[in-house]
Amino acid sequence: MMNTFKTFFLLVSLFISTAFAAVNINKASAEDISKELKGIGIVKATAIVSYREKNGPFKTMEQLTEVKGVGLKTVEKNRKNILLK
């Protein structure tokens, strides 16, 4: 019975950790950004890519809040999934 619970929790942990993959916001397409980040649809993801193209690569995650429609709460809930390099 204990092994069943261990297996179950291992599978749940694996699912949760792979539900959203990390994405490099300085290289990814709008489609990839919208797929991988919670609360970022294609419109916001396109705005992120446009901002990046006009202003250069993001140096910090907090810089994402300069993109219209992206707030600090969105950055915080995606912190583990955002890569800069």
Image (cartoon, grey):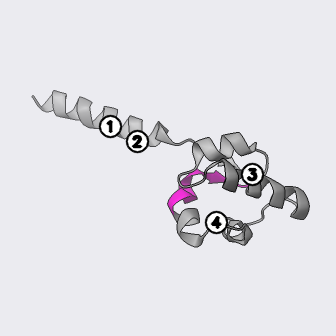
Query: Can you tell which mark lies on residue 12?
Result: 1
- Work out whether mark 3 precedes mark 4 in sequence or the reverse, and give the earlier one: 3
- What is the three-letter code of the residue carrying label 3? Thr
- What is the three-letter code of the residue carrying label 1? Val
- Work out whether mark 1 precedes mark 4 in sequence or the reverse, and give the earlier one: 1
Tag 2: Cα neighbours inside 10 Å, few (<14), some, or many (≥20)?
few
Start-end of magenta stretch: 77-85
- Work out whether mark 4 precedes mark 2 in sequence or the reverse, and give the earlier one: 2
Query: Can you tell which mark lies on residue 16?
Result: 2
Tag 1: Cα neighbours inside 10 Å, few (<14), some, or many (≥20)?
few
Figure check: 17 above or below 56: above
Query: Can you tell which mark lies on residue 62?
Result: none
Residue at 64% in and 65% down: 70
Marks 2 and 3, Cα distance to the nearest angstrom? 26 Å
Q: Is residue 34 shown left or right of residue 28?
A: left
Residue at 88% in and 64% down: 55
Residue at 60% in and 53% down: 40
Residue on which the image places disc 3 = 46
Tag 4: Cα neighbours inside 10 Å, few (<14), some, or many (≥20)?
some
Does the CB distance between marks 2 and 1 fall below 8 Å? yes
Determine if residue 65 is in view.
Answer: yes
